[in-house]
């Protein structure tokens, strides 16, 4: 996770209320505009107690798109960092918001990556 958040993210930081955080914090709530769509983004920042970096992304009426998730990934992490979306076992599902996706990165270890040719041809 970046140690300093970009200005476009700071401009959308929620500074008052239940999800308030201070400018410069890596955790907090943010309102991010992707094209004409407003995304609600919550970051836990690096959680050293549990060993994860986590960001959730939601909209009011639909699930975020791949491009929107890529935008948020790039706002919080460097381009050479690998983060993931998880599909847990059904018994472990948590559905607090019907249109929310999550990005995760473990603080310890690395996320294994499949060889690129298994994903598809590079053009």
Image (cartoon, helix red, strand yellow):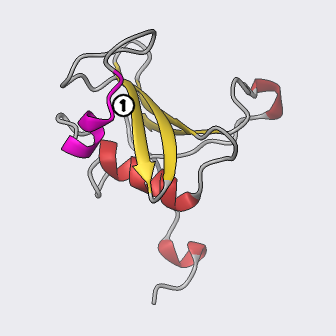
Asked whether 49 falls inside the magenta stretch, the response is no
From the viewer's side, name the closer residue of 39 and 101.
39
Against 116, residue 102 (above or below) is: above
Against 121, residue 102 (above or below) is: above
Q: Report crowding for label 1: few under 14, some 14 to 19, many 20 or more residues within 10 A (C-alpha).
A: few
Q: Residue at x 36, y 31 (%)?
A: 108
Whether residue 113 is visible here, answered yes or no, is no
From the viewer's side, name the closer residue of 34 and 50.
34
Q: Residue at x 59, y 56 (%)?
A: 65
Q: Quadrant of residue 123?
A: bottom left
Q: Quadrant of residue 23?
A: top left
Query: Number of labelled discs?
Result: 1
Magenta region? 7-14
Q: Relative to residue 114, is residue 91 drawn left or right?
A: right
Q: Which residue is mark 1?
A: 108
Q: Residue at x 39, y 43 (%)?
A: 110
The image position of residue 26, as x and y in percent, is 27, 26
Q: Residue at x 31, y 18 (%)?
A: 15
Q: Quadrant of residue 120?
A: bottom right
The image position of residue 50, as x and y in percent, is 44, 16
The image position of residue 27, as x and y in percent, is 33, 23
Whether residue 71 is visible here, answered yes or no, is yes
Q: Secondary structure at mark 1?
A: loop
């Amino acid at each position: 996770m970046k140690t300093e958040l970009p200005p476009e993210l700071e401009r959308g930081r929620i500074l008052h209320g239940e999800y308030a955080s201070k400018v410069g914090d890596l955790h907090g709530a943010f309102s991010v505009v992707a094209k004409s769509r407003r995304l609600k983004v919550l970051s836990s920042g690096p959680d050293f107690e549990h060993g994860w970096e986590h960001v959730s992304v939601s909209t009011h009426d639909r699930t975020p798109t791949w491009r929107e998730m890529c935008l948020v990934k790039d706002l919080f992490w460097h381009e050479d960092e690998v983060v993931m979306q998880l599909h847990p076992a059904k018994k472990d599902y948590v559905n607090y918001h019907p249109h929310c996706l999550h990005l995760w990165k473990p603080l310890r270890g690395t996320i294994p990556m499949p060889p690129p040719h298994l994903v598809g041809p590079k053009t």
